[in-house]
Amino acid sequence: KAGVTQTPRYLIKTRGQQVTLSCSPISGHRSVSWYQQTPGQGLQFLFEYFSETQRNKGNFPGRFSGRQFSNSRSEMNVSTLELGDSALYLCASSPGSPGVITEAFFGQGTRLTVV
Amino acid sequence: AQSVTQLGSHVSVSEGALVLLRCNYSSSVPPYLFWYVQYPNQGLQLLLKYTTGATLVKGINGFEAEFKKSETSFHLTKPSAHMSDAAEYFCAVTSSGGSNYKLTFGKGTLLTVNP
């Protein structure tokens, strides 16, 4: 069974630009979550999607947005990039059935550098 | 709100020695607890999880953890450290209340294994 696939692995962008990151979950998983990892703040929850609907959102500005497609693939977008957005962005997938907690499987991440 | 505290941002052990990584959580509802490991430039890999039932949980690579409700702890142990255990370890908590998946992570503990 293929794991969680994130593309691209590495990305360099300039301040003010926007960026789109992609995540393909494990086949059959309907929940996709996104996390930002930085040395200073650690791992922080961005948002979670289940069946194309955002179920939960973390404390990030509106510049951070996401969506999920009918095949469960997800994208996150960051507009008007700032230097502080440089981070490892991790995607996690899980079956996501409401009220049922199982483990989340993580992708290898996308390393975003803003210059 | 939930929170996780990992005592010790850096733990150093000798090969063959006991590994003990500490995790304390705060949760107003029954928690679900996880330990993840991260190798450099990689995503997170699940070591073990506690959802319900047996409080002593065994995971991969010889790791185990014990859920102690009275102490709000979920410490990770391994009887004998191996060089390949050198990595960063994260404790995380979530709950069945509300939406899944929103993991709250600790700041991480970097494990160094000395030959």
Image (spheres, rainbow, N blue to C red):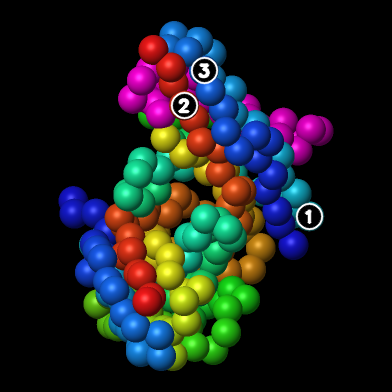
Q: Which residues are magenta?
A: B61-86
Q: Return the residue at label 2.
A: B112
Mark 2 vs mark 1: tell me if same chain. Answer: yes
Q: Are marks 2 and 3 in contact (CB under 8 Å)?
A: yes
Residue at horizontal 27 percent and vertical 71 percent from the top: A11
- Residue A35 visible? The answer is no
Q: Quadrant of residue B70?
A: top right
Eyeballing the image, is A62 above or below A9? below
Q: Return the residue at label 3.
A: B13
- Please report, as a chain letter, where disc 2 is located: B
The label nearer to you, 2 versus 1, is 2
Q: Amino acid at mark 2?
A: Thr
Q: Amino acid at mark 3?
A: Val
The label nearer to you, 3 versus 1, is 3
Picture coordinates of residue B73 (x, y %)? 71, 35
Q: Amino acid at mark 1?
A: Ser
Residue at horizontal 71 percent and vertical 57 percent from the top: B2
